[in-house]
Image (spheres, grey):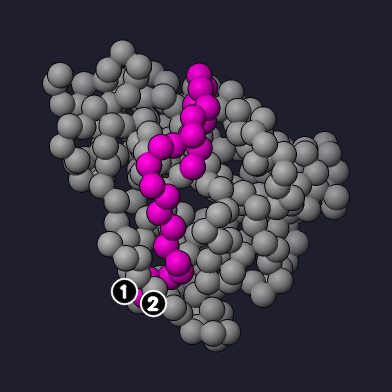
């Protein structure tokens, strides 16, 4: 087997764990080469949108975990749009992190949004128009998290686009005790985004369920959940530019938890 060539099932083998950067570049290129990348293109540097994102979203929406959830946090990227719409259409509270967390978390209550505007409200622009202003101390407990990914393994190790915001969002919610060790995390990806192996750092979280246009799978690796914000992973620029971090410092100070290796 040649390292990096797609297998028949669409996964990208990596017999030796590659760096995150290398894996991202490989997956972005593969999606473009196979012409399954969708607007906005090129997908390099983004959580890639992909052909079949709607089918992958429907698989998430059909899970028992989704059915039981009252509050669902979903990332604001294009491939997860149908998940966000599905949350609102199911009458559930949708929490969307604002881009780069500059405006914190946006809370969208479908009871306050006309059904005809659910699709608009689930977009980044629309969410700012329809979200309720909610101080961080009033955010609700989150029953399910759905994140975007650039690459993910069948063991649940996930790689994002490189900004670290999904990990920071989880850490903030954990600091606020709005998620816990048992809160399920799911991701929607194209089958070509499933890789054989990937590196993981102490601030990363694993996903429990992977949904693709063709299948829904429970991951089979150990669950990894950071206990909160890891102070030395934050830059001074992040502390300056993300108001919610300043608010956390004001409320209780930043934890400096580290997962046991």
Give the left or right position of residue 72, taking residue 5 as reference: right
Crowd tier of the residue under label 2, counting other residues whose Cα lies within 10 Å: few below 14, some 14–19, many 20 or above: few
Residue under numbered circle 2: 256
* C-beta proximity under 8 Å, tags 2 and 1: yes
Quarter of the rendering containing residue 8:
top left
Residue 4 image position (x, y, % from top left):
20, 26
Residue under numbered circle 1: 232
* Residue 60 visible within the image: yes
Q: What residue appears at the point 56 percent right and 80 percent down from the top-left corner?
A: 247
Bounds of the magenta span? 208-232
Q: Measure the C-alpha gap from mark 2 to mark 1.
A: 8 Å
| Secondary element at image label 2 | loop
Q: Quadrant of the N terminus?
A: top left
Quarter of the rendering containing residue 97:
bottom right
Give the left or right position of residue 193, taking residue 83 as reference: left
Q: What residue appears at the point 35 percent right and 70 percent down from the top-left corner?
A: 258
Is residue 218 located in the magenta-colored stretch of the structure?
Answer: yes
Q: Nearer the viewer, mark 2 or mark 1?
A: 2
* Dominant SS in magenta: loop
Figure label count: 2
Residue 214 image position (x, y, % from top left):
50, 19
């Amino acid at each position: 087997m040649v390292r990096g060539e797609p297998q028949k099932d669409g996964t990208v083998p990596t017999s030796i764990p590659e760096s995150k950067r290398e894996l991202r570049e490989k997956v972005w290129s593969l999606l473009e080469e196979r012409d399954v990348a969708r607007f906005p293109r090129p997908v390099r540097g983004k959580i890639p949108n992909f052909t079949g994102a709607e089918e992958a979203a429907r698989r998430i929406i059909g899970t028992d975990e989704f059915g039981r959830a009252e509050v669902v946090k979903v990332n604001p990227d294009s491939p997860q749009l149908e998940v966000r719409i599905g949350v609102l259409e199911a009458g559930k509270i949708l929490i969307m992190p604002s881009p780069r967390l500059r405006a914190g978390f946006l809370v969208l209550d479908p009871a306050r949004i006309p059904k005809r505007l659910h699709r608009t409200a689930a977009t980044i622009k629309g969410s700012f128009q329809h979200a309720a202003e909610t101080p961080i101390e009033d955010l609700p407990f989150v029953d399910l998290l759905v994140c975007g990914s650039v690459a993910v393994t069948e063991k649940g190790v996930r790689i994002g686009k490189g900004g670290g915001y999904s990990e920071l969002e989880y850490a903030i919610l954990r600091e606020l005790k709005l998620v816990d060790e048992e809160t399920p995390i799911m991701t929607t990806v194209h089958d070509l985004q499933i890789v054989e192996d990937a590196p993981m750092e102490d601030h990363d979280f694993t996903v429990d369920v992977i949904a693709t246009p063709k299948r829904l799978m429970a991951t089979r690796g150990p669950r990894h959940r950071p206990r909160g914000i890891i102070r030395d992973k934050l830059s001074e620029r992040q502390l300056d530019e993300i108001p919610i971090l300043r608010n956390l410092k004001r409320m209780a100070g930043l934890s400096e938890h580290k997962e046991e290796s």
